[in-house]
Image (cartoon, rainbow, N blue to C red):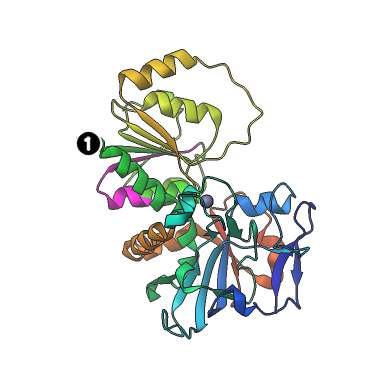
């Protein structure tokens, strides 16, 4: 069968392997035929050789962590043949740490977790894959065209879950949300904000392309000014750029008792001149919280599946700006100027 693979650590080793072995039964009882795989920046980093780890004893890593498939057989009865399914990306560390011990692998403390398509587990960019019932997420049939958005949605479902848990430290009635960055994560974070009935603002540097209309279609307001020039103080900020100036401005801009959730991974190595004392003063005097959020556990995947099923399906579809057949895989992994989410199509 076909699989999209790399040799981790070797730049530009991306290949479509035609005779990859069928998934081993140890991978899980549920056998799945791949429908599609979403592509993101993590895949690009792995292809560049900056990241990624093959399974033990193997030279190559199958890519793909934003899965969508259809169940071929499930002898456990958890799902039925024909059901749509996604596989949870991260598996708990084998020791396990206190968080992994209670299936909060998204909060792993020792870093020994594994991840499909990223770290020591084969990814989902292959014609067939297997998954254990515990890591299988069933999707509403209506999500057949867009279900590969479940993984990035799980990331923002976790972010919102933790924002709300932190909010419960006090009487808290948030009204205004600022999302910085209108990539897939930012747009999905904005979607979940609108589902909460909040007043949503999305800030991105792009003045053209599909992003402004996608934001407006949510009933949200699109901004291209610097964060510091916005004329309101958000109760919640979901930061999705990782750009140092945007991150720091967002921390300073939050309203009293505001919560700033950082989801963007900065590359580091760039320094800027910044008044750290003024930031500390603002955070203390306004009871603000700044926290980081990454990954998601099964509960968040289930919340994400509900959120996607509730969303406007046409809007979700418009996030997918290119669908590339597997045979043309190299095009899928080559970024385009108006890309939001590019999907590798295993049915074409
Ligand atoms: Zn752990």
Q: Position of residue 48 (x, y in %)?
A: 74, 49
- Is 193 a magenta residue? yes
- Which is more toward the observer, 118 or 216? 118
Q: Residue at x 25, y 40 (%)?
A: 168
The quarter in which the N terminus is drawn is: bottom right
Q: Is residue 317 visible?
A: yes
Q: Residue at x 64, y 26 (%)?
A: 270
- The image shows a total of numbered marks equal to 1
Q: Position of residue 72 (x, y in %)?
A: 52, 84
Q: In the figure, is residue 176 to the left or right of 186?
A: left
- Which is more toward the observer, 182 or 208? 182
Q: In the figure, is residue 197 to the left or right of 223?
A: left
Q: Position of residue 187 (x, y in %)?
A: 43, 49
Q: In the figure, is residue 221 to the left or right of 322?
A: left
Q: In the figure, is residue 210 to the left or right of 12?
A: left
Q: Secondary structure at mark 1?
A: loop
- Is 79 a magenta residue? no
Q: Which image quadrant for residue 57?
A: bottom right
Q: Which image quadrant for residue 238?
A: top left
Give the residue at mark 1.
Answer: 172
Q: Position of residue 37 (x, y in %)?
A: 57, 66
């Amino acid at each position: 069968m076909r699989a999209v693979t790399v040799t981790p650590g070797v730049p530009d080793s991306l290949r479509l392997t035609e005779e990859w072995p069928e998934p081993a039964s140890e991978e899980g009882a549920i056998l799945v035929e791949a429908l599609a795989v979403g592509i993101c920046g993590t895949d690009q980093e792995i292809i560049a050789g900056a990241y990624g780890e093959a399974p033990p004893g193997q030279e190559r890593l199958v890519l793909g962590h934003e899965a969508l498939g259809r169940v071929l057989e499930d002898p456990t009865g958890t799902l039925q043949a024909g059901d749509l399914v996604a596989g949870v990306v991260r598996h708990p560390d084998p020791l396990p740490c206190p968080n992994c011990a209670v299936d909060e692998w998204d909060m792993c403390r020792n870093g020994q977790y594994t991840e499909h398509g990223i770290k020591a587990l084969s990814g989902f960019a292959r014609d067939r894959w297997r998954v254990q019932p515990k890591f299988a997420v069933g999707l509403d049939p209506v999500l057949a065209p867009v279900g590969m958005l479940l993984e990035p949605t799980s990331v923002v479902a976790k972010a919102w879950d933790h924002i709300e848990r932190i909010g419960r430290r006090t009487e808290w009635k948030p009204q205004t949300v600022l999302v910085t960055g209108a990539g897939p994560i930012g747009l999905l974070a904005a979607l979940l904000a609108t589902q909460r009935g909040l007043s949503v603002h999305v800030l991105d540097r792009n003045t053209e392309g599909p992003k402004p209309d996608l934001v407006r279609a949510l009933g949200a307001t699109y901004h291209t000014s610097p964060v510091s020039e916005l004329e309101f103080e958000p109760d919640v900020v979901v930061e999705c750029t990782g750009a140092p100036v945007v991150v720091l401005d967002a921390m300073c801009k939050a309203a009293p008792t505001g919560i700033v959730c950082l989801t963007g991974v900065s590359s580091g190595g760039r320094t800027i001149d910044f008044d750290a004392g003024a930031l500390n003063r603002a955070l203390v005097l306004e009871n603000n919280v700044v926290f980081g959020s990454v990954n998601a556990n099964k509960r968040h995947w289930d919340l994400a599946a509900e959120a996607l099923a509730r969303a406007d399906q046409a809007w979700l579809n418009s996030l997918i700006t290119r669908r590339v057949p597997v045979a043309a895989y190299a095009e899928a992994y080559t970024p385009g100027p108006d890309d939001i989410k590019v999907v590798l199509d295993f049915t074409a």
